[in-house]
Image: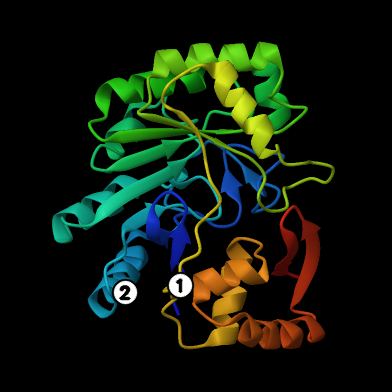
Amino acid sequence: MYRFIFGPVPSRRLGMSLGIDLVPRKVCSLDCVYCEVGLTTKLTTERMEYVPYQKVINELTSYLENHPAPDFITFSGYGEPTLNSRIGDVLKFIKENYPDLKVAVLTNGTLFSDKKVREELMDADVVLPSLDAATNSTFKKLNRPEKHLSVDDHINGLIQFRKEFKGKIWLEIFILPGYNDNAEELEALKNAIEKIQPHRVQLNTLDRPGAIEGLRAASNEELENIREKLGLENVKVVAAAATRQDSKAYRDDTEYAILETIARRPCTVYDLRNILGLHVNEINKYLDVLQANGKISTEIGERGIFYRIA
């Protein structure tokens, strides 16, 4: 099985997406309270080759030569992909050898103040950076950044990237009630959005358990109210992922596939159904065995019972 690529998984924004994971769990420049991967274990802005370039290329080549092409190849996974100093080389390899494949980068955008990082992403088709806060106090409370990062540098990096990048920028704002939904923060976010000028702004909220307890998801009504308050035409609420009847994970070992999937993101049985393309009854049989053997645990979330690695 593959170590550095995963999926394809059905993405609400990118269709069937084959993921590339360029950093170990969980290396990131932020320690967001809502992160579904969990607490950051290495909070850093240091760029290095966390995952060997050649191993990523070998796995990617093997997959693409033996499976149908996904809708997107997406840099995402355990942590912040731009921390890997070879991300530009991987992206260049894809575009030179598979020019018809679309590439997306899911990033928190905190390293965009570095010109080299911006240059390395120029071959991507879509970049999906985050901006959850536009005041430093909320940035520190919600995103808990590495000590050298500031919200002003974050915003300015996004502004500069927008000027240079020829592809699409879909800016995600993760709304967390009690953190960034007050009038002052929303006004600051609106001002930042107007300066960045992304092609799309997508409002999101909790869908799976976050890194700390006591958080709640914004309701759809709350998200719609925030969209109206922002008063910008390109702001949309991100809808729940659609059911894909033909979802497949392209894995032979069902138990291993389930463990690999929930190791990256806690999932409900219905998430696993969509990702693995298996009937719920079959998945439940495996979950019963895995739980009985102490390999997985459960948590109650907004959408029901979530399964994670014990």
Give the structural element (helix, strand or loop) at label 2.
helix
Looking at this view, is 226 or 197 the one in front?
226
Type of the residue with mark 2: Tyr
Quadrant that contains the N terminus: bottom left
Give the structural element (helix, strand or loop) at label 1.
loop
Q: Please tell me how crowded label 2 is: few (under 14), some (14-19), or many (20+) other residues with Cα within 10 Å.
A: some
* Visible residue check, residue 149: no
Q: Is residue 1 above or below residue 95?
A: below
Image x and y of residue 281, in percent: 65, 85
Does residue 177 appear left or right of residue 112 in this picture?
Answer: right
Type of the residue with mark 1: Gln
Res. 61 image quadrant = bottom left
The residue at 60%/11% (across/down) is 187
Image x and y of residue 122, in percent: 25, 37
Res. 63 image quadrant = bottom left
Q: Is residue 290 above or below residue 85?
A: below
Image x and y of residue 103, in percent: 30, 50
Of badges 2 and 1, nearer the viewer stands 1
The CA span between labels 2 and 1 is 22 Å
Looking at this view, is 231 or 264 the one in front?
231
The residue at 50%/23% (across/down) is 154
For disc 2, the marked residue is 63
The residue at 72%/39% (across/down) is 33
Q: Please tell me how crowded label 1 is: few (under 14), some (14-19), or many (20+) other residues with Cα within 10 Å.
A: few
Looking at this view, is 236 or 165 the one in front?
236
For disc 1, the marked residue is 245
